[in-house]
Image (tube, grey):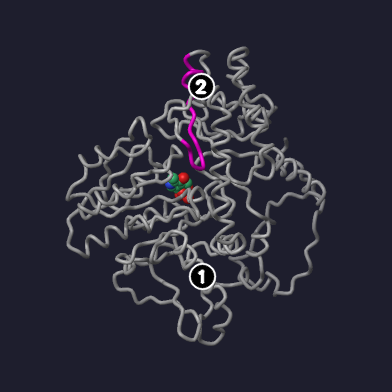
Amino acid sequence: MPLIFDQSKSGRRGVRPPSGDVPSADELPAQYRRQHPPALCEISELDTVRHFTELSRRNFGLDSGFYPLGSCTMKYNPKILEKVAALPGFSNLHPLLPQLRQGGLLVQGALQVIYDLEQLLNELTGMAGTTLQPMAGAHGELTGMMIVAAYHRDRGNQKNEVLIPDESHGTNPSSAAVAGYSTVPVDTDAKSGMIDLNDLERKIGGQTAAVMLTNPNTLGIFNRDIQELVDIAHRHDALVYYDGANFNAVMGRFRPGDAGIDLVHVNLHKTFATPHGSGGPGAGPVGVAARLLDYLPVSRVVKRRDNTYILDYDYPKSIGYIAPFYGNFGVCLKACAYILMLGGEGLRQASDHAVLNANYLMNQLKDIYELPFKRVCMHEFVLSARRMQNEHNIRAVDIAKGLIDEGFHPPTVYFPLIVPEALMIEPTETESKETLDRFVAAMRRIAGKAKEKPESLRQAPASTPVGRPDEVRAAREMDVATLPEP
Ligand SMILES: *Cc1c(COP(=O)(O)O)cnc(C)c1O
């Protein structure tokens, strides 16, 4: 497919800009004036539309098909939330508008959204206070670890280690390391798929600043030992951090605060209906227990007795700003609208359906693909392609690529690391039974191919504009222009 610049014809026009209503460039000093016209392509509106429509059809998105990417929660996000975020009263705001003096009314609505969303998240997580500043899950973890460090410093505790289960998301150890801690992995019990409390007891001590727990964990399993884990940690004056990126599994059913958890982050872009991909935009609000409130980032939005809202900076123990202004306000706005739109009962139903859909898929697939941890799952589950590798030399990556030819986005593969040839599948609550059944049929066809035509599977995908790249070469020579044309 030609680049849009290759389609350019001198003198052709797509738009005709209105004549300028600002002084012309002749009045600029000569050294600031452009010497040559900009290198824009000259193309008609129709050809522009066709070019970008064609490009978009080569992409796979949630609006075009099922996207069971485990741990990422690629669910459908109602379009009305985009409309809410585009309301001029929100989209025309500037973070430096005065809050109360002069044009104070301009930002009161936005401050109320921040305040209300914090209250709603406190209610959902059972925590005493929440900051909306962190701009991703990993950023929330870093914020949490900085709060842990500030808390221990304040109490004169000398602690340098954070304990993290070996199945955790890779962001957990990196966040703890960036905050200055050494990290110690804790084993997963081979039978239950939960963190091994005996191993935890062996490794925890006076040096432990925090234990990071992901729940449901990356195997999609709900940890039934949370209370015991919290008690063990607190006996050593260690805080417990709850990675709640995948909170969509437990909304309205479980509140980390009720189990004595000290810090929790949730991913608004997974659970609370913000589309995500390619690294953003997202938000990873962090909730804390009462004893950690003083360390939350500033500024905080507070509600005054006359029902107006102001930004308060008077928290001397705060870890300070961790994002410009108030974080990704548009993402928070969409999350607030989503929560209010569904209400408590609706959120609980969303979680129930996410869990039901995942268990349905797991039970439809467990006879043909190996299921290493045979437990009721939460929002996702992990299969292993090890048996297929042994019998037919077909790996998880071949199954993933085969799914592309079937019209589905592949699941997450090779994660968590503790499962060989892992396929991590998350259907989300927004998919219908018919879609799930089509996915099961595709997975069964692929299992058949692994037996009968393994070579075709090893070469999949065959139906896409770009075939399977040579992975080693792709990593070494990152030049997309050399990819073969279809
Ligand atoms: C997605 C995820 C994260 C990281 O969130 P980002 O917003 O991608 O930084 C952390 N932990 C778990 C369990 C996740 O699923």
Q: Is residue 41 left or right of residue 282?
A: right
> Who's the residue at 54% across and 83% down the image?
104
Amino acid type, callout 2: Arg
Q: Residue 343 placed where, x, y %? A: 58, 62
Q: Is residue 347 left or right of residue 18?
A: left
Q: Would you call the spot at circle 2 few (<14 residues within 10 Å), some (14-19), or many (20 or more)?
A: many
The mark closer to the camera, 1 or 2, is 1
Residue 122 visible in image: yes
Q: Residue 181 placed where, x, y %? A: 26, 49
Q: Point out the stretch of residues depicted in magenta.
A: 376-390
Q: Nearer the viewer, residue 240 or 161?
A: 240
Inter-mark Cα distance, 1 to 2: 48 Å
Q: Residue 176 placed where, x, y %? A: 32, 49
| Disc 1: which residue | 116
| Disc 2: which residue | 395
Nearer-N-terminus badge (1/2): 1
